[in-house]
Amino acid sequence: MARKFLYIIIGLVVLVFAVLLVLRVYAEDLTEIAFVPSAKFTDQPRLAAASYDDPTMWLARPGMVNDPSRWLPSNYAQVQARETAATDDATRPETETRPSPAKVDAAVFFVHPTGLVSRTNWNANLDDDASRQRSRLFVKGMASAFNASSDVWAPRYRQAAIGAFLTDAPEATQALDLAYRDVEQAFDTFVKRIRPDQPIVLVGHSQGAFHLRRLIRDRIAGTPLGQRIAAAYIIGWPVSVSRDLPLMQMPACKDASSTGCIISYLSFADPPETAMLLRAYARRRGLDGKEVGPNPEFVCVNPISGVEDGKAAAKDNLGTLVPDLVQGTGALTSGVVPAMCGPDHLLHIGPPPALDMGPYVLPGNNYHLYDMTLFWSNLRADFSRRVAAFALKR
């Protein structure tokens, strides 16, 4: 089954890579032809009120058999000591021992990125087995960085097709709104199922991050839930300093022990070509409903150091998750990929890393598909550290 999942995702990413390469070489105008659905958008009814009470509506949740979020890299045990040591001792009294990485007390709500490449559908069908399996692989590679908690929840949702981010047609907004309704409904069920005093950590990548921005504005900002957010990892979609943060009522994480704050970044190797990214970003308005403008400033928190606008050397990278495309697994390699938040508000990782990550880097040295796996171990340590700091502050 793992191999089947792997082959599906390889096919998907190769398709994305190949088409984006053609677009870059030949014509930007071909973008819509390649990705944007040609079908008319058809709205779908809201899911039944109790839909997310059904365990099958979750890709990951406590007690699930074969939960992909419980996966760990093949050599995780060898790097675990460094990861644990990276948890800041200043966040707990000297007499207190380090917590086991398997006992982080926070409920994690993870929203997976886009796995739908379709010109015939604006939104994924929940009955589509291929889309579901691709989403499970995203949970395996990304949400697993947070499985030091036993409470990792990842909903299935009627995700918008990738083309929704490549056009400003009204159908794109309708598709994203439909997907968001599912995420919002899943979150409400998640909150009901966890302990009423339990810290919450939000994690999303790409489309998942896009929806979490809105979720924070609509469901969390200015409510008692806001006091329970230990951290929000809004990765792979820009968070505007002026258009988003004021309505989210959460700051960027200033340092490695900040809590109740946002970690966000977008990864590029040098030299970066960012025009395609910025055009996609400009198609979507900020949370305040206004256009983001031609020179937007967005949040960059360094995933290695945990510091806003920070810089970190490769030696401090605790582990990049390098996939094994033959076996359908992966292993960690430490000390290879650096990270620096640049004046362009992007996360620069230096020259393309000398790692066999597969041929899936997007045009322009865009490491979007690897935003989280490049820093898998550091994100894991960051999560443990911030939750520990949050517990002390409470």
Image (tube, rainbow, N blue to C red):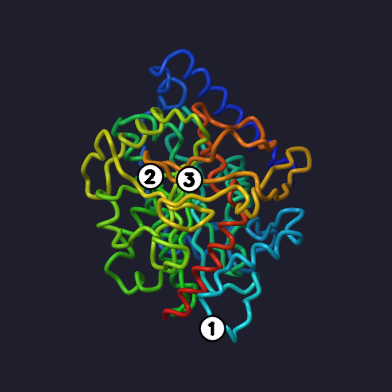
Nearer to the camera, 40 or 203: 203
Q: Residue 83's quadrant in the figure?
A: bottom right
Residue drawn at x 35%, y 37% as measured from the top left: 281
Type of amino acid at the residue the image marks with label 1: Pro
Secondary element type, mark 2: loop
Nearer to the camera, 383 or 255: 255
Q: Residue 275's quadrant in the figure?
A: top left
Residue furthest to the right:
327
In this rendering, position of residue 189 left or right of residue 137: left
Residue 34 in percent (x, y) is at: 47, 22
Residue 238 disc label: 2
The answer to the question of whether label 2 and label 1 lie on touching residues, with beta carbons closer than 8 A, is no
Callout 1: few (<14), some (14-19), or many (20+) C-alpha neighbours within 10 Å?
A: few
In this rendering, position of residue 177 left or right of residue 209: left
Callout 2: few (<14), some (14-19), or many (20+) C-alpha neighbours within 10 Å?
A: many
Secondary element type, mark 3: strand
Q: Is residue 324 above or below residue 244?
A: above
Residue 340 disc label: 3
The answer to the question of whether label 3 and label 1 lie on touching residues, with beta carbons closer than 8 A, is no
Secondary element type, mark 1: loop
Residue 76 in percent (x, y) is at: 73, 58
Type of amino acid at the residue the image marks with label 3: Met
Nearer to the camera, 383 or 208: 383
Gap in angstroms between the C-alphas marked 3 and 1: 31 Å
Residue drawn at x 63%, y 51% as measured from the top left: 315
Q: Nearer the viewer, mark 2 or mark 1?
A: 1
Residue 93 disc label: 1
Q: Is residue 106 above or below residue 273?
A: below
Type of amino acid at the residue the image marks with label 2: Pro
* N-terminal label among 3 and 2: 2
